Each structure stands twice: as structure tokens, then as C-alpha cells.
Amino acid sequence: MKGKLIIILIAISVILSGCNSSDEKVIKIAQQYGLAYAPLELSKELGLIEKYLPDYEIQWKQIMNTATIREGMLSSDLDIGFMGIPPFLIGVDNEMGWRIFRGLSEAPVGMTINTNKVTTLDDFDANHKIALPQPGSIQHILLSMFMEKNKGQADALDDYLISMAHPDGQIALLSASEVSAHFSSPPYIFEELKDDNIKLLIDGKDAFGGEFTFIVGVVKENFKNDEVIVGINKGIDEAVEMIKTNPEKVAELMAPVYGLDEETTLLYLTNKDMDYSNEVKGVDRFSEFMFINGYLEENVLEEDVFYEK
Amino acid sequence: MYFMKNKKLLYLLLLIVLWQIISMIVDQPQLMPDSISIFQKFWEEMINGKLWLYAFYSFAAIIIGLSISIILSLAIALLSIKYTWSMDFFKFLNSILHPLPGIAVLPVLIIWFGVGYSSIFALIIHSVLWPILTNLFSAIETFPKTLSKVGDNYEMGILKKFIFIYIPGTMPSFIAGIKTGWARAFRAVISAEMFFGIIGSSGGIGWYLVKKRAFLDTSGIFAGLIVIILIGMFLESFIFDRIEKLTLEKWGFKI
């Protein structure tokens, strides 16, 4: 009887010790899937961040969507997350204390259509839907921007959205399903456009009216650790530099990550619209649009959301 | 009875106060909004009419799916009373398919039926049919021979016997099966809506939750949960109670 009790107590203490994440030497970084995250994949592969932060353990988490990353950061399960600007702004608008500490990449995002199913913006209905990661994602906001510009109504197509991860969306677009359009990003958009029946209907840059940063790095406000931020930035910058100076080597390393062959990976990484840099462009424009169209309750200003030392 | 209801009201009040206190201690509205703002949100969403619409879509899908399943299960039961092989076959099928959770078969259903209403109905039928059949079969197997013989004495055909003897006789199990099935269907539909978003021309309550989550609107999520609870309670205490009154109590199974 006593033996059993001890075993149970040990079991409980083991389980509880797993919950305790107060170890300060661990940094948990969340990223998503896609070519835009290539510098992170490279840092992970080569241990670039560990190089600048030898005292820390870096834990990478690959997460399927931004909402989950946001919830993870909210519950202090994650320290740093990478995402599009609109989901970040939604968090700020809901009093989430977090800040942008760097840009990661610009990428050619856009909405492709299967011309066997639809040809114009007017063809969408309950049987012809648009796949994108989720409402409030950068893809959704870009679609809304395009609709406002061209039809005068930002939510004109909101009734025909389907929430899908990019790989599922790609399959659904190409197959004989209700999904007739897919608002996605590289490499999925590149792969889709290889098909003769797939055409680009909306270009993200046209929708936005200029250049914008696709993915930014975000850190919680209470994670005030300049040493770590500087270290992470150095690691990622080194990866970015490597993509620019030695893309062949990077393609070799990244091909298995993206399930593509080396040649294709090199082609995609060096696409003229794929631009990796720490610059952050477009926060004000996103914020203003989202505020005017009711996605945000307040207009968030760029100067209020950057990480400062 | 009145006292019982009063007591439940008291518990509810206690729960709300407790929630309010904890949310004030936590003091992070994105994690745990206080009860006042949840009710405010709930009211706001109801007045705008949108939340009702979402709830209506899920509810309608379930009712239609439930009706199809009931008809199917009655047909299978009729067949199984007539032929033993049918009972054996469906019992075998039931033992294979009953343990499969609806959300687990969803990927297959999407491949077969797409992301529209057909998948949702297939999912509901899968969730509802097996619990009803399990209950119906055990009721049929233990069905008193005498009652069936009474039908024979009146020279009833199989269809007449089924309608006037078997259906009333197995009603308690039948209703128990529908209740289990309904609970499973409700879960399945909400998971499916959260899985692939809008079905048909408008989304259901699951899609509403996805949208609220995407915009970090925690009070909105709780407003959606309240609606789900209300729908469950409505079905339990109005629809099922009424059916039981009209059948079981009338026929003397339950007083």
C-alpha cells in the first residue's frame, strides 16, 4: 500500500516537473511553414543562433497557424514568434504586450485561381471558395484590401472563405473540389503556378499598393533581454547573408526541408521578389486599413510597436 | 420542482461570481475575460443577429442529419427483424465503425465528399447511426416474444408489427440512442466546422469560434460557447423531454 502511494507521488511529481518552464536559459521560438522562413530554417540547421548565444538552449517549434503561436505566447509557452503583420496588430489591438524586433522577409504572395472553376472575381459563390490560412491572416487582409480597391467593399468575398493550411489548400485548388482559389505564399504559390490551369488573379503587392514585409519577428514585452535579441538577430542576419552570397549551398541544405529538389529550391530562393532582410515595411498602411474596415478597434502606430533597447 | 430550478439558478450565480473573482485576480482579458464583458459580448452578438444565424446553421445541419439517420436506422431495424443475416451484418459493421470518432474520419470524408454539406451530413450520420443501432439491436434481441406473438394473433404483417409493436416497444432504447447520437453529432459538427470553415452559404457556430479565435476575441469565444450550451440545454429539456412525454410516459414506460 505504501509502495503504491510512493509510486503515485513520484509519478505526480514527474508530471508536475514537466510543467515547470521557469528555466531561464531556454528560448522557445515559433515559426510556420514556407520559403519566407528560410533564414530561420537555416539558423536552426547550422545552429547559428546558438553560436551567438552559447549559454542558451534554443527550442524551435513549427506551428501550423498564427493563432496558435499567439496563444502560445499569451500563455508564456513561447518567447518569440514569427508571423505576418496583421495577426500581430490584432494582438496589439487586444492589449497583448508584444513588439516587433525585426523583419524577416518579403515574398510574392497572391491569390491563384483554377481557371477550370472560376475566371473572374464575380464567379465566387458557395460552390467556389477561396482557401487561405485563417481570417485575419495577412492573406485575408490583402484579399480585403484588393476587394476594397476594386469593388469598394472589403468583405465582399468573406462569405466564401475556407480556412486551410497552405499544403492542404494547394491540393484542394488542384483537385476537383469546391476550392477554386488559394491565397498563399511561396513555395506553394510557385508550385501551383506551374500548372497550366492555374493563374494568378491577385498580386499581393497590387493589393497592398506597394512593398510590405511578409514575416516579422515578434517578442513579448516582458521578455526584456537585449542580449538575447541581439544574439538572435546576429544569427538570423548571418543566415540572410548566406542566402544572398551562397544560395547554392543554402539550396542544398534547404531542399530536404521543403521537399523540393535542389535546383528548384535555388530557383525559388533567388526569385527576384523573395527578399530577406531585417527591414520592416508596411505596419502603418496595414494598421490604417484594418482600422478603417473594422478589423482593429484602434489605429496602431508603427512607432509604438517596435522593440527598443 | 420549483425549488430544484431555484437551486440551479443559485449554482449559476455562484459560478458567475467565482468566475468574476478569478478573472479579476488573473487580470488578463485575453486569457480570461470577466463575466460582465462576456455577457455584454453575448448580448451584442445576439442583437446583431449574427450569432443566432451561425447557431441556426449548425442546428439545422444537425437536425437534417439526425432525421436521415433515424430513418436509416429504422429501415435497418426493420430489415434486421425480418432477416437474421441483416442483424449479424450490421452488428459486425457497428462493432467496426462505432469506435471511430467522427473527427478521425473527417479527412477521408473530405476526400470523398469535398468540403460542403455532403461531408457534414456523412459525418453526422456516422456519429448518430451507430449509437442508435447499438441501442435498437439490444432492444430487439431482448424483445418479449409474447408481444410479437400477439401481433401474429391479429394476423399483422411485418410492417404493421414493426410500426405498432416493435417501435413503441423499443422506444426507450431508441430515444436513449438518439440522445447519445445527438451529443456525438453536435461535437462532430462543431469540430468539422472548426476544421474546414464555412459550409454552404454561411458558417456555423464552429466557424464563428474560428473567426473569434483568429481575432483574439476571447469574450467572443465565450459568447459562442454559451450559445452551444444553450442549444444543448434547449434540445435536452424541450425537445427530448417533449418526445418522452408524448411516447414513453403516454405508453407507460416512464411515469
Image (spheres, rainbow, N blue to C red):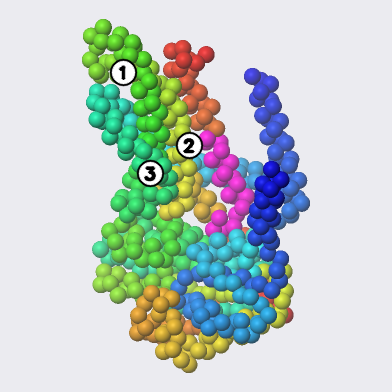
Q: Is residue A234 visible?
A: yes
A237, B199: nearer the viewer: A237
| CA–CA distance in space, label 2 to label 1 | 26 Å
> Where is residue A104 shown, x and y percent of the image?
54, 79
Q: Chain of mark 1?
A: B
B145, A292: nearer the viewer: B145
Q: Amino acid at mark 3?
A: Leu
Judged from the image, the secondary structure of the residue bearing numbered disc 3 is helix
Q: Which residue in the structure is indicated by mark 1?
A: B163
Residue in the image at 41% along x and 21% along y: B171
Q: Are marks 3 and 2 on the same chain?
A: yes
The mark that comes first in sequence, 3 or 2, is 3
User: Magenta includes A51?
Assistant: no
Q: Is residue A286 above or below residue B119?
A: below
Judged from the image, the secondary structure of the residue bearing numbered disc 1 is helix
Left or right of residue B127, residue A89 in this image: right
Left or right of residue A220, residue A238 in this image: left
Residue in the image at 51% along x and 26% along y: B238
| CA–CA distance in space, label 3 to label 2 | 13 Å
Q: Which residues are magenta?
A: B213-232
Q: How many marks?
A: 3
> Where is residue A103 shown, x and y percent of the image?
57, 79
Q: Residue furthest bottom?
A: A245
Q: Which residue in the structure is indicated by mark 3?
A: B123
Q: Chain of mark 3?
A: B
Judged from the image, the secondary structure of the residue bearing numbered disc 2 is helix
Q: Which residue in the structure is indicated by mark 2?
A: B183
B36, A61: nearer the viewer: A61
| CB within 8 Å, label 3 to label 2 | no
Residue in the image at 48% along x and 36% along y: B183
Q: Chain of mark 2?
A: B
